[in-house]
C-alpha cells in the first residue's frame, strides 16, 4: 500500500513538473518572439508588412512578381499582399505566427512618419479588400491666409470649416477647371473645397483626380479595408500566450482614422483588439480611447473598457447590426502584446454596468450628450469669439475631447431617431471650425439666416449661419 502511495505521489509531482516545464517553455517562446518582432520590424515603413515570427503563409496579388515574405524581417508593400495566414502557437514546433503592418489608412501624405499599426498574432488570416487599381493621387497645399472651406466648389457652397494662415493639408481631388481643390476638413471625417488661388501647391494639381462635387467617398488605401478571421483559441497550457487576434493602434495627435473590417466601418482614435469567428461574430474591444462602429446602417460608440459584437456569416461578412455594449474580461486581455505597439498604453479596466448604460444611451438622463446640454436656439446671435472659448472650457470641465463630444452628439441623434439632425450637424460644423485653442483670428458672428448644416441657401429662420471671418484674403465673392 505504501508503495502505491509513493508511486501515486511521484506521478502527481511528475505531472506538475511537466506542466510547469511546458509553461516555462511557452513563456520563453512568447517572450523571445515578441522581442524579435520589436527588433526585426523596427524599420517597417508606411504601407509595409513585416514578417515578425514564424510561421506565416503569404499570398501575393495577381501580376506581382517581386515578392519575398519567408523569414523574420522580410518586408513587402501591403498593396502587393492578397492575404496573410499566421500559424497558431505550437510549443512543440516552436512556432507562433506574428506579423506587423504600418498603414497610411486615411492619414494625409503630409504626415509620413505617422501610421496606423496592425499587430496580428496566433491563428489569424487577413485578406486585402482594397481594389489594387483604386489609387488616390494627392498634393500638399499651404494657405497664404485664413481661408474658408466650402461644401461645394463654389461661393454658393456653405462654409464647412476653415484653414488658418500657413496651415498645411492634403488635397485629394479637383473640379474640372482645377480652380477648386478638395481637402479633408481638419478634425473631421468630412471633405470640403478650397479656392485654389488662395493656396500654395507642392506638386502638380493636374495629377489629382477630377471628382464629383457631391462625392464624399475616397477609395481606400492599401489594407484600409480587409476581411479577417481568428481561430478559436485552443488550450495549449500556456498562461503567457495572448488569445489569437489583431491589435490596431492609431497615432497620437492626428484625430480619428477610418477602417473597414468584414464590411463593418470602424472609426478609431485609440487602440482596439479585434477577433472574428466565421458564423459567429466580429468582436471589437476598445482598450484605450474610443471607437465608433457602424454596421447595417446602425452606429455604436464604444468607450475604453467595453466591447461590441457584430454578427458574421460563414463568409466573414457582417450579417447584422452592432449588438449591445458589454464589458470585456480583463484576465483574457492581461497578456495582449501591447509592448510591441508604438504608443505606450495601459489596458483600460472593464466598464461597470452603470457606465455601460450611460455609454449605450448618451441621450438619457445625463443630458443631450453626456453631461452637456445644448440649447441650439440660445446660440443664435452669439459672437463666435465667445462661442469657441466657451465650448472649449465646457469640454475641459467634463474632461472630454472635441472628437469624443462630436461622437456622442451623433450617437444621440441615432437614439433620437434623427430628429433635429440638420441643426445638430450645423452645430457640429461650427464647433469643428473653432481652432483647438478656442480663439478665432478675427471675430465674427452667427445668428438667424444661413444653414451651415447642408450648405444650402440662406433664409431659414432660427437656423445657424456659417462662420464668417473678417480680414480674410478672398476674392469677391469670398470663397
Image (tube, rainbow, N blue to C red):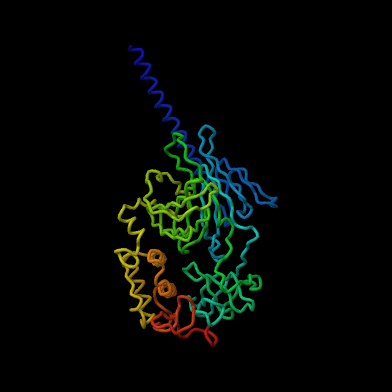
Quarter of the picture containing the N terminus is top left
Q: Residue furthest bottom?
A: 476
Front in this rendered view, residue 45 or 263: 263
Left/right placement of residue 141 relative to residue 300 reads right
- Judge by depth and name the residue closer to the eye, 187 or 50: 187
438 with respect to 114 (left or right) = left
Percent of width and height locating residue 249? 47, 55
Q: Is residue 145 above or below residue 336?
A: below
Tell which of 70 and 303 is nearer to you: 303
Residue closest to the eye, 459 or 426: 459
Q: Is residue 90 left or right of residue 330?
A: right
How many numbered discs? 0
Q: Is residue 6 above or below residue 445?
A: above
Residue at image location 35% in from the left, 51% down from the top? 350
Q: Which residue: 49% across, 67% down?
A: 189
Q: Horizontal and vertical percent for residue 449?
A: 42, 84
The x, y position of residue 185, in whole percent, is 50, 71
The relative height of residue 150 versus residue 305 in the rendered view (above or below) is: below
Residue at image coords 42%, 71%: 421
Q: Position of residue 57 (x, y in %)?
A: 60, 43
Answer above or below: position of 217 versus 161. Answer: above
Amino acid at each position: 500500500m505504501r508503495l502505491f502511495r509513493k508511486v501515486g505521489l511521484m506521478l502527481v509531482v511528475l505531472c506538475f513538473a511537466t506542466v510547469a516545464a511546458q509553461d516555462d517553455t511557452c513563456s520563453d517562446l512568447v517572450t523571445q518572439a515578441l522581442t524579435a518582432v520589436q527588433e526585426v520590424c523596427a524599420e517597417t515603413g508606411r504601407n509595409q508588412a513585416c514578417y515578425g515570427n514564424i510561421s506565416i503563409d503569404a499570398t501575393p496579388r495577381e501580376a506581382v512578381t517581386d515578392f519575398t515574405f519567408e523569414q523574420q524581417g522580410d518586408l513587402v508593400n501591403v498593396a502587393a499582399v492578397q492575404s496573410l495566414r499566421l500559424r497558431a502557437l505550437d510549443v512543440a514546433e516552436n512556432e507562433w505566427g506574428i506579423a506587423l503592418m504600418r498603414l497610411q489608412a486615411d492619414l494625409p501624405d503630409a504626415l509620413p512618419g505617422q501610421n496606423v499599426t496592425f499587430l496580428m498574432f496566433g491563428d489569424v488570416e487577413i485578406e486585402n479588400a482594397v481594389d489594387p487599381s483604386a489609387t488616390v493621387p494627392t498634393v500638399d497645399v499651404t494657405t497664404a491666409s485664413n481661408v474658408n472651406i466650402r461644401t461645394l466648389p463654389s461661393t454658393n457652397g456653405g462654409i464647412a470649416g476653415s484653414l488658418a494662415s500657413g496651415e498645411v493639408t492634403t488635397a485629394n481631388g479637383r473640379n474640372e477647371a482645377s480652380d477648386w481643390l478638395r481637402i479633408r476638413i481638419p478634425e473631421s471625417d468630412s471633405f470640403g473645397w478650397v479656392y485654389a488661388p488662395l493656396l500654395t501647391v507642392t506638386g502638380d494639381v493636374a495629377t489629382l483626380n477630377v471628382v464629383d462635387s457631391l462625392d464624399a467617398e475616397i477609395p481606400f488605401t492599401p489594407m484600409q479595408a480587409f476581411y479577417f478571421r481568428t481561430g478559436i483559441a485552443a488550450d495549449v497550457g500556456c498562461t503567457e500566450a495572448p488569445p489569437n487576434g489583431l491589435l490596431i493602434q492609431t497615432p497620437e495627435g492626428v484625430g480619428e482614422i477610418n477602417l473597414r473590417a468584414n464590411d463593418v466601418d470602424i472609426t478609431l482614435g485609440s487602440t482596439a483588439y479585434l477577433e472574428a469567428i466565421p458564423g459567429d461574430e466580429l468582436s471589437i474591444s476598445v482598450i484605450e480611447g474610443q471607437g465608433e462602429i457602424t454596421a447595417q446602417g446602425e452606429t455604436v460608440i464604444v468607450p475604453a473598457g467595453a466591447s461590441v459584437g457584430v454578427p458574421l456569416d460563414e463568409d466573414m461578412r457582417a450579417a447584422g447590426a452592432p449588438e449591445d455594449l458589454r464589458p470585456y474580461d480583463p484576465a483574457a486581455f492581461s497578456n495582449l502584446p501591447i509592448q510591441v505597439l508604438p504608443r505606450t498604453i495601459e489596458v483600460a479596466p472593464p466598464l461597470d454596468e452603470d457606465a455601460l448604460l450611460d455609454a449605450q444611451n448618451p441621450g438619457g438622463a445625463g443630458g443631450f450628450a453626456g453631461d452637456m446640454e445644448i440649447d441650439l436656439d440660445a446660440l443664435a446671435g452669439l459672437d463666435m469669439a465667445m462661442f469657441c472659448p466657451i465650448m472649449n472650457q465646457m469640454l475641459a470641465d467634463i474632461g472630454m475631447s472635441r472628437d469624443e463630444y462630436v461622437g456622442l452628439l451623433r450617437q444621440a441623434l441615432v437614439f433620437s431617431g434623427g430628429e433635429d439632425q440638420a441643426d445638430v450637424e450645423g452645430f457640429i460644423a461650427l464647433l469643428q471650425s473653432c481652432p483647438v485653442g478656442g480663439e478665432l483670428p478675427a471675430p465674427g458672428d452667427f445668428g438667424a439666416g444661413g444653414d451651415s448644416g447642408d450648405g444650402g441657401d440662406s433664409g431659414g429662420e432660427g437656423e445657424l449661419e456659417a462662420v464668417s471671418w473678417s480680414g480674410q484674403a478672398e476674392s469677391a465673392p469670398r470663397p
